[in-house]
Amino acid sequence: MTDTAAAEAFWIIGPARGEIRETPLFQFGSAGPETVEVETLYSAISRGTESLVFHDRIPKSEFQRMRAPFQAGGFPYPVCYGYANVGRVLSGPAHLVGKTVFSLFPHQTRYRVPADAVTVLPEGVPPERAVLAANMETAVNSLWDAEPGIGDRIAIIGCGVVGSLVAWLASRIPGVRVTAIDTDPAREPVLAALGLDLVSQPEEAGYDLVIHASGQPGGLKAALELAGQEARIVEMSWFGNREVSLPLGEAFHARRLTIRSSQVGGINPIRNPRWGYSRRLALALSLLDEPALDSLISGESAFEDLPETMARVCQPGSGELCHRVVYPAARR
């Protein structure tokens, strides 16, 4: 295809408004031996962050830091945003042509990027499940920040996609006892598929580690209540432009609690000398070889329906986990 070629992409054009637009292929790379052209098969809506973008809740101070790797346009809008894309390589280096790859690309039918911006899916990971890679990468990064130990009692508050993945990964550490906490009973069969029990209200406190991923201020307050003496609380939720009030009086200081933020954009300094983003993403993809993780895909719809789908998935209380978007190339 020539550099005049275009694809179709989903753009946010105003608060809670989106549309499908024609978008040039070449904005992130001209055709050449070190560039790949990819035909998208599936993408996924990362509901937590994308709902903040969709509803214009990104603070101006974070406009640059919150840019997705291949975002087009700028905040607040018009913006083409997203980072969970699985597609088939149409052209590029010979060893990549025909391969199914993951990239941190928005919702777009075709795109062209540097060859090192795509990661080939490992054997055993179907493209339909690979849309969870960015969420798995976030979960891995949070546990690096949390530094759980063998035998720890760990509470995870908020069992959306990322919280559920954190709970699943933590439960595989020898001797660790995981308590998965969520007030939505619809999460119970999802967690059961992952070998976990859902708890709406723990009967005891004193956890060694508490990881908060509910996106609700009340969840972080609950984390303070559940943490044991000298325990660590890892905050995974990002509240956008919403202020959060915490009771840091009471026993917060007496119990010498630590609140630590975790964000996938940075790698724990202890690992940073050895781990780069490409190695971390390859690890995340390899961890998706478990069929039980399909339980985190709560629905799917056609790319053409994205304006209506995004509005529905991103509305408060929608209950969606990972929503998969199916492209024409996957239906051929």
Image: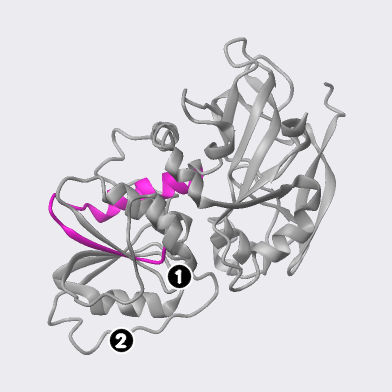
Residue 206 in the figure: left or right of residue 50: left
Q: Is residue 64 visible?
A: yes
Question: Dot 1 corresponds to which residue?
Answer: 185
Give the label, 2 or 1, closer to the camera.
Answer: 1
Position of residue 162 measured from the top left corner of the image (x, y, whole percent): 44, 55
At 14% from the left and 75% from the top, the residue drawn is 256
Depth order, front residue of 209/197: 197
Depth order, front residue of 158/54: 158
Question: Dot 2 corresponds to which residue?
Answer: 247
Range covered by the magenta-colored residues: 134-159
At 84% from the left and 48% from the top, the residue drawn is 21
User: Is label 2 in a helix, a strand or a loop?
Assistant: loop
Three-letter amino acid code of the residue under disc 2: Pro
User: Which quadrant of the figure contains the C terminus?
Assistant: top right
User: Which quadrant of the figure contains the N terminus?
Assistant: top right
Position of residue 311 measured from the top left corner of the image (x, y, whole percent): 72, 65
Position of residue 44 measured from the top left corner of the image (x, y, whole percent): 61, 47
Three-letter amino acid code of the residue under disc 1: Pro
At 63% from the left and 40% from the top, the residue drawn is 105
Q: How many marks?
A: 2
N-term-proximal mark, 2 vs 1: 1
